[in-house]
Amino acid sequence: FGSVSFSSPVVWARTGLFGSIGTDKALQFIYGVDIIDHIQAHNDLFIQQGYCGIKLGTFTIKAGRWEEIFGNQNINLSSGGILWSGNATPMTKISLQIPNYSVLPFTKGFAHFKGGISHSWTSDNIYVRNVWLHHKYMYVRIGGKAPIHFEYGLHHFVKWGGTSADPAYGNLSDSFSTFLKVFFANGNDDSSPVQESQNAIGNHIGSHNLAVNYKPRKTSIGLYWQSIFEDASGMKLRNFPDGLWGFTISSETRRNISGFLIEFINTTDQSGRYHAIEVDGNYMIVGGDDDYFNHFIYKDGWTNQGMTVGTPLITSPVLLTSESDDYLANNRLTAFHLGLEGSISKMDYTAFYTFSKNYGTYSSPFINSTDQHSLLLKSTFTNLLPWDISMSVAVAADLGELFQKNAGIMLSFRKEGFVKWKSKNDN
C-alpha cells in the first residue's frame, strides 16, 4: 500500500484506531485512522488511512482513504490482483458498496451477489492535474449450500477529467454528460480529444474474474482467473491468455502447511503486436499493442505516486525508469509465483517465491528478455513476549537482471486489542 520507505535503514512507528458505534447491526457508524512515521534522516509523518462511514444493512457508505484489495485471488498468498493489488498508496474516495455476499432475491439462497461504485481523487499531478477515477464492480456466486461454488465478477476503472500539461489536450471535460459516457465506456464527445471521442472517453481498464471453489469439510480448493482489458479487443478476450491464473488450497486441520498457492501471470499477448497496420497506403486499426497500464493522455498510467496500482510484476516507475514515451517500461512478462503459509510450534510463517521473465513493452522492448527471482520468508511469534506483543522477522531478496541484487530484513513488534468505552451509567 505504498507505505514502504525507499531509504535504508529506517524505523517505523505506526498506530491506528478502527471501530464502529451502534449496537444495532442494521445501522452502524464506522471510522478508522492509521498514522505512520518513518523515522530517518528526513522524518516522514503521514496519514495512511483515515475514513468514516455508515453501515446500513448490507450497504456501506464510506468516505476518506483506506487500504483495500479487489479480485478473487487468495489475499494472503497471491502476488496481487491483476488490477488492484494493494501495491500503491490508497486514494481518497467516496464509495457505496455491498462489500459482502448477500442473497440474490428470488433464488432461495442458491445465488449471492456483491458490488459497488466509487469516485476517487488521484494524487498524482505529473502529467494531468486533478484527475478523477471512476470504479464499479459486480460479483455473482452460485452454489448455495453445495460444496462447490462458481463465481463471476467484473471490474471497470476509468481515469477521466483533469487538466493536461500538454496544450494539445488542456482542460479535459468533466461534465455530468461526460461522466455518463465514461460510465458506459462511450465516445462521441465533441469536448474531448478526437482520439478519445472516436473510442471511449478517459483511460479505461477492466477485468473479468472467474473462479471455481470447492470446499469438502475443512479443506478449500480454488481455481481462479483474472483477465485484463483496456479496450474492446481485450474485453472480447482477443488478448487471451493474458491475465492472472491461480490455484490455491487451504486446510483448517493441517497446521504445518495450512495454505498453498501457485499462480501464473501472462501479459505478453496484448491483442497482438500492432495497434494499426498499413494496407494499400492506408492505416487500418487492428486493436493490438494494448500497452497495459500506459496511456497517451494520462501518461502516469495505472499508477499512484509512482507505484503500480495493479499487479506489481508490471514494474512500478519508481523502481524502473523508462527511456521511452511509456511511463511504465515493463508491461510484457510471464511469471510464476508460489506461496506457502502455516505454523510450526509457536511460530506462524509465510513464504513467497516469484520468477518472472520480462520483455519491456511492444514499442520499446528489452534487447534481451530479463529474468528476475524474488524471495520472502516471514516468521511471526505471537506468544513469546509479554503483554500480548507479537514479533515478526521478515527476510527478502531480489536476484536477477531486472533490479540490482538486493537483500533486506525487517524486525517488527505489534500490539493490538480492543478499547472499551464506558458510559457514566457503567459500574
Image (tube, rainbow, N blue to C red):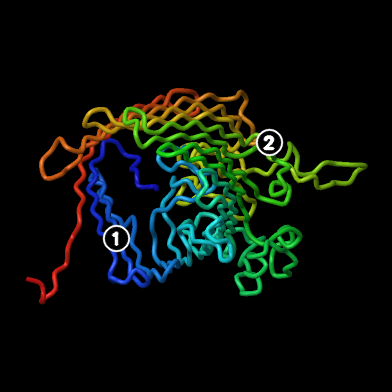
As displayed, is residue 16 above or below residue 292? below
**Residue 388: x %, y % from top left:** 15, 44
Q: Amino acid at mark 1?
A: Val
The disc label shown at residue 33, or none: 1
Name the residue rendered at 42%, 35% in the picture.
250
Name the residue rendered at 51%, 40% in the picture.
214
The disc label shown at residue 345, or none: none
Relative placement, left or right, of 308 versus 67 is: right
Name the residue rendered at 56%, 27% in the picture.
357
**Residue 168: x %, y % from top left:** 67, 60
Q: Residues within 10 Å of mark 1 (few under 14, many from 20)?
A: some
Given residues 100 and 69, the one toward you in this image is 100
Relative placement, left or right, of 177 versus 4 is: right
Relative placement, left or right, of 301 versus 420 is: right
**Residue 16: x %, y % from top left:** 25, 56
Quadrant of the rendered structure where residue 46 is? bottom left
As displayed, is residue 27 above or below residue 225? below
Specify which label sits upstream in the sequence, 2 or 1: 1
The residue singled out by tag 2 in the image is 269
Quarter of the picture holding the C terminus: bottom left
Q: Amino acid at mark 2?
A: Asp
**Residue 133: x %, y % from top left:** 54, 61
Quadrant of the rendered structure where residue 182 is? bottom right
As displayed, is residue 290 above or below residue 171? above
Q: Residue furthest right?
A: 280
Given residues 44 and 27, the one toward you in this image is 27
Q: Circle 1 — which element? A: strand
As displayed, is residue 280 above or below residue 232? above
